[in-house]
Image (tube, grey):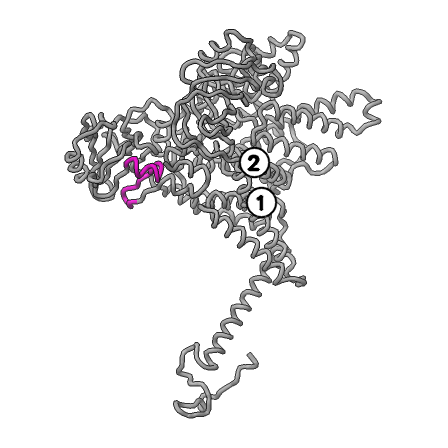
Amino acid sequence: MANVPFIPMGEQPGRGTGEGRPDPTKGAGEGAFGSTRLWQTGGRLSSIARRLGGAAEEFLAKAGFDRAPWLAVLFASGILTWFALASPWQWIAAIGLSLMAALFALAAWQGHDDRGQLRRAIIACAVIFAAGIAVIWLRSETVGAEPIKRPVVERVQGYVLDREDQPAQERLRLTMAVRDASTGEGRKIRVNVPAEAAREALADHDADALAEGAVVRMRVRLMPPASPMLPGGYDFARAAWFKGLAATGSVIGSFEIVEPAPGASGIAALQRTLSAHVRERVDGSAGTIAAAFASGDRGAIREEDEEAMRDAGLTHLLAISGLHVSAVIAAAYFVTLKLLALFPAFALRFRLPVVAAAVGALAGIGYTLLTGAQVPTVRSCVAAMLVLIALAMGRDALSLRMVAVAAIFVLLLWPESVVGPSFQMSFSAVVAIVALHSSGPVRAFLAPREESSGRRFGRSVAMLFLTGLVIEIALMPIVLFHFHRAGVYGAFANVLAIPLVTFVSMPLIALALALDAVGLGAPAWWLVERSLDLLLGLAHMTAAQPGAVKLMPQMSWFAIAPFTTGGLWLALWSGRGRLLGFAPVTVATVMLFATPIPDILVGRDGRHVGITALDEHGERRLISLRDSRSSYSRDNLLELASVTADPIPLAEWRTARCSAEFCTLAIERGGRQWNLLLARNRAMIEERALAAACERADIVVADRFLPRSCSPKWLKADRRLLQRTGGLAINLEDRRINSVAASQGEHGWWRGEER
């Protein structure tokens, strides 16, 4: 400011002085005063920027948090950004902006020691974020398979890549490599084979002939992998893209085995053999659960048992993940340690923790491979390996850095898993557990002290309940986002279920398998059956309680993002500053309860339509256009409408009027009446009559192409529109339409939907 000339008020020249002094009445952009004001504004902004930079530098220098977990979060954020952005130019722009930020930090503060923390943070964050986008883009381009254009019925001959037994659905599921009949190109398909057809094909072969390596011939009906039926539904097309599947379908009639499998070998054959062995030893539903624990094979679990486990908050026990892998590794570690300690000569020559860690690592890797090496299992195995290394080195085994390393390892191999519920639930649970047990109050609560065994047991039970409650709170937003329903009493059920599975059922299964080697496993299998019957009884009892299930409509990304941000801040930050994470969580909770329930749900093909309405008792019900036999379609409509009762067919609704071809319905929403016209089939009717009916309707929905003369007042959702938009969720009060296409962009799996 020293260079700005001082002009006394009395010496300011008037107009026409000719002395070249500026007129003070001119605009800020004119003359020396205008330049001075701009210079002053720029100086103030520069000063503010310097102060903010200094504050950020001081904050980063004093913060005591671990940087490694945040790098994993940024890497995952880059992957999520690729899914959220619509087109390649946006992906390139995101990478470019990230790298520009890194270059700016590198150039602007080169040699400035007072900006070292800030410069390193910006460079690391920008580069890791850009790497996440690049990794998932590369993964998509290398593994994605273009889906077939339309449904076809054809005869195929293919090589069996994978076989999955699903006795609960009375079928086999085969993944095969076949050659396209028209182009000659190879493609990967997945087909369902009825159990009866499989038995007929195996009549002249041994039981292992239909396995990996077999060549089979069959007539199949193939479909492109299905996009979500409704906004927020499961995106099988995306999952199939990253699995390389070009089509899915089912066998029509019988099929034949051209070349039997070379022989039962490998992990898959061992998994099937072990699963069948366990189901032979344990009867009923308990046997299917035991088979899932022993081999990861869930194909035999009955639908009602799986639903009860889900509604009781116990589904995580069926998915082989951290609990199971940790139990196997811990058992192997401690058994090895205790057995080797009985031999002084060995104990004096070798470090027993290192040997026990090696045995535990082998047991964990073997169990991971045996149970299918799914993402949660791999994550748990990697994390367990890090724990064993820490134990062998005498380091702290429980840390968020360990979780971050495991997350980055999984995301480098399967970056697409970050958008799936398995990855999100698995890591959220582990982060919540580690953050809880690493906090000061919990450490003090669990610290050893002189007390009676009863008080020690009480503290353990209280800590188990608190851990279950924290896990339920951490998982609730994710479960509601993906499945639109969550068990409310999961924390209470897990207090009993987790110890039962960890310390009773799984050790008994391992003991029974070991005793089977000498033919003495029957008593152990009887105990296994009793323990798993108790687990299933707990699940069914919990799920049957009033209010046991909480249903929510589709949660938007704007609601789930604050939940995730606040949760990560609470878990990964340190000190009192972590309490700031409650702010976004509170905002997200308000947004969640304010989420409107769609008035009308239209499936991607226009055949399945659901309308929410109140019955004569004031309860919300779902009115369904068709009484669908498909549990998939019915469940999608019910969950996204937040309705638990069975849907009511539209033809039976008190205010609906139906003919053989169409139904009409008038509903009150947003202070006005909406008239709906819904097609029941594809029967052709006289165009003039259709045009007149459309003219009286506000919304028309049909699963076929409607003529241009059909012109409703607001929306015509016929096949022509639905092919572009996919399924629709319509909110009449604010006239908002949410479509599947709005969240797909130009990703490869959605381009295959274009006709």
Looking at the picture, tell me which residue is in the foreground, 102 or 345: 102
Residue 566 pos. (x, y %): 50, 46
- Who's the residue at 40% across and 17% down the image? 252
Identify the image quadrant of the C terminus. Answer: top left
* Quarter-of-image position of residue 737: top left
Looking at the picture, tell me which residue is in the foreground, 267 or 311: 267
Drawn side of residue 663 relative to residue 95, left or right: left
Q: Residue 519 carries which label?
A: none
Q: What residue type is labelled 1?
A: Leu
Crowd band around label 2 with a 10 angstrom C-alpha radius: few (<14), some (14–19), many (20+): some
- Who's the residue at 39% across and 89% down the image? 15
**Residue where numbered disc 2 is placed:** 414
**Residue where numbered disc 1 is placed:** 572
Of tags 2 and 1, which is closer to the observer? 2
Instruction: Determine if the magenta segment contains residue 163.
Output: no
Q: Which one is earlier in the sequence, the residue at label 2 or at label 1?
A: 2
Q: Is mark 2 on a helix, strand or loop?
A: loop
Residue 318 pos. (x, y %): 52, 24
Crowd band around label 1 with a 10 angstrom C-alpha radius: few (<14), some (14–19), many (20+): many
Q: Is mark 1 on a helix, strand or loop?
A: helix
Drawn side of residue 730 relative to residue 192, left or right: left
Question: Measured along the vertical axis of the image, is residue 457 above or below residue 62?
Answer: above
Residue 410 pos. (x, y %): 59, 36
The span picked out in magenta is 718-735
* Quarter-of-image position of residue 675: top left
Q: Which amino acid does label 2 sit on?
A: Trp
Looking at the picture, tell me which residue is in the foreground, 266 or 214: 214
Identify the image quadrant of the N terminus. Answer: bottom right
